[in-house]
Image (cartoon, rainbow, N blue to C red):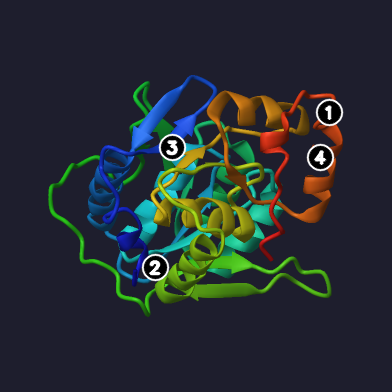
């Protein structure tokens, strides 16, 4: 595996990739790959050039995952942002990223306030009942069947910010080679396979849960349960309902979930937590 394009092409297209537990929608690897290729072509034909930044301010869901993979497939740089930021925070990050467009929801008022101030185009991400993600916005109305050039390992795929604990947050670029090396290492370390079902328990705009919990499961051909939000009281019911075999979290979350295991009737088979993927 050399780039994120390789993430989806070595898996049985019939295998389930994503399960959305709120309504039971399942998206197969073939459908996910087709969506990413289709939307990447539209993204590149909107006037964006390779290496330009696409900011993503979306909650957890298939829309977020497809938006991220679409941007990287189109040789653009995906820049995730916390959708709960205030308008002034969005403005800081958008300026620092030098973003060219923003992908968000139809009701993201704070994001849209910041984009208006910066005169940035906004693309709205939504999905239909079958899990197909749609993008709408300036320059993306025309459909195309052209396939954009594939990224190369040295292309920057992901731009994230440090926490800013001791100063202003600093942007950190990660190449396709950086990200793919990480996800392959994680999948190999935990021996993930198509027989596994992972559960995403935290926001995908954070590198741990994007790389360590989601992309690492995809590279192994596993299925991912992707709720729009996952609270402590919902964790064990989701594990039981979908036969979850794997998840990743920080130690505090492990402790909270194990403390609830008895009261939530978690059977001993599922009382297995893995070390934090730092």
Locate the N terminus and report the quarter of the image it occupies.
Answer: bottom left
Query: Helix or strand or loop: what does disc 3 sit on?
Result: strand
Q: Residue at x 58, y 49 (%)?
A: 204
Where's residue 18, x and y in %? 43, 37
- Compute the Cα span from label 3 to label 4: 25 Å
Q: Answer yes or no: do the residues labelled 2 and 1 have beta carbons within 8 Å? A: no
From this viewpoint, which residue is outermost toward the front? 268
Q: Which residue is mark 2?
A: 52
Q: Is residue 98 left or right of residue 264?
A: left
Residue receiving disc 1? 262
Q: Earlier in the sequence, mark 2 or mark 3?
A: 3
**In-front residue for pair 57/1:** 1
> Is 224 drawn above or below residue 26 in the view shown?
below
User: Rounded to the nearest whole Å, what is the CA distance between mark 1 and mark 4?
Assistant: 8 Å
Position of residue 36 in the picture relative to residue 87 (left or right)? left
- At label 4, counting other C-alpha atoms closer than 10 Å, the crowd grade (few under 14, some 14-19, many 20 or more) is some
Mark 3–mark 1 contact, CB under 8 Å? Answer: no
Nearest to the eye among marks 3 and 4: give it. Answer: 4
Q: Report which residue position mark 3 lands on.
A: 18
Q: Secondary structure at mark 2?
A: loop
- Tell me the crowding category of disc 3: few under 14, some 14 to 19, or many 20 or more residues within 10 angstroms, Cα based: many
Q: Quadrant of residue 265?
A: top right
Q: Could you tell me if the residues under marks 1 and 4 are in contact, i.e. CB atoms within 8 Å?
A: no
Could you say whether the residue bearing mark 1 is in a helix, strand or loop? loop
* 11 on left or right of 165: left
Label pair 3/4, CB-CB below 8 angstroms:
no
Residue topped by disc 4: 258
Q: Earlier in the sequence, mark 3 or mark 4?
A: 3
Badge 3 or badge 1: first in the primary sequence: 3
Mark 2 or 1: the one toward you:
1
Q: Nearer the viewer, mark 3 or mark 1?
A: 1
């Amino acid at each position: 595996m050399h780039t994120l394009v390789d993430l989806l092409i070595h898996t049985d297209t019939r295998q389930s990739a994503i399960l959305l537990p709120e309504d039971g929608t399942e998206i197969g690897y073939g459908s996910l790959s087709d969506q990413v290729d289709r939307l990447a072509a539209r993204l590149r034909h909107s006037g964006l050039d390779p290496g330009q930044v696409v900011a993503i301010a979306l909650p957890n869901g298939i829309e977020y995952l497809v938006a991220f993979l679409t941007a990287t497939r189109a040789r653009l740089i995906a820049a995730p942002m916390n959708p709960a930021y205030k308008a002034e925070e969005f403005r800081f990050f958008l300026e620092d990223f030098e973003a060219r467009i923003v992908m968000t929801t139809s009701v993201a008022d704070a994001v849209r306030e910041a984009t208006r101030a910066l005169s940035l185009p906004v693309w709205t991400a939504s999905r239909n009942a079958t899990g197909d993600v749609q993008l709408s916005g300036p320059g993306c109305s025309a459909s195309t069947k052209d396939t954009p050039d594939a990224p190369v390992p040295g292309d920057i795929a992901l731009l994230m910010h440090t926490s800013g604990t001791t100063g202003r947050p600093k942007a950190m670029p990660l190449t396709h080679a950086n990200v793919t090396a990480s996800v392959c290492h994680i999948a190999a370390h935990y021996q993930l396979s198509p027989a596994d079902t992972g559960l995403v328990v935290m926001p995908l705009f954070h590198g741990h849960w994007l790389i360590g919990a989601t992309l690492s499961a995809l590279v192994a051909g596993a299925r991912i349960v992707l709720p729009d939000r996952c609270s402590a009281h919902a964790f064990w019911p989701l594990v039981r309902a979908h036969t979850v075999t794997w998840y990743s979290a920080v130690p505090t979350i492990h402790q909270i979930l194990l403390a609830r295991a008895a009261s939530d009737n978690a059977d001993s088979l599922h009382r297995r937590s893995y070390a934090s993927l730092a």
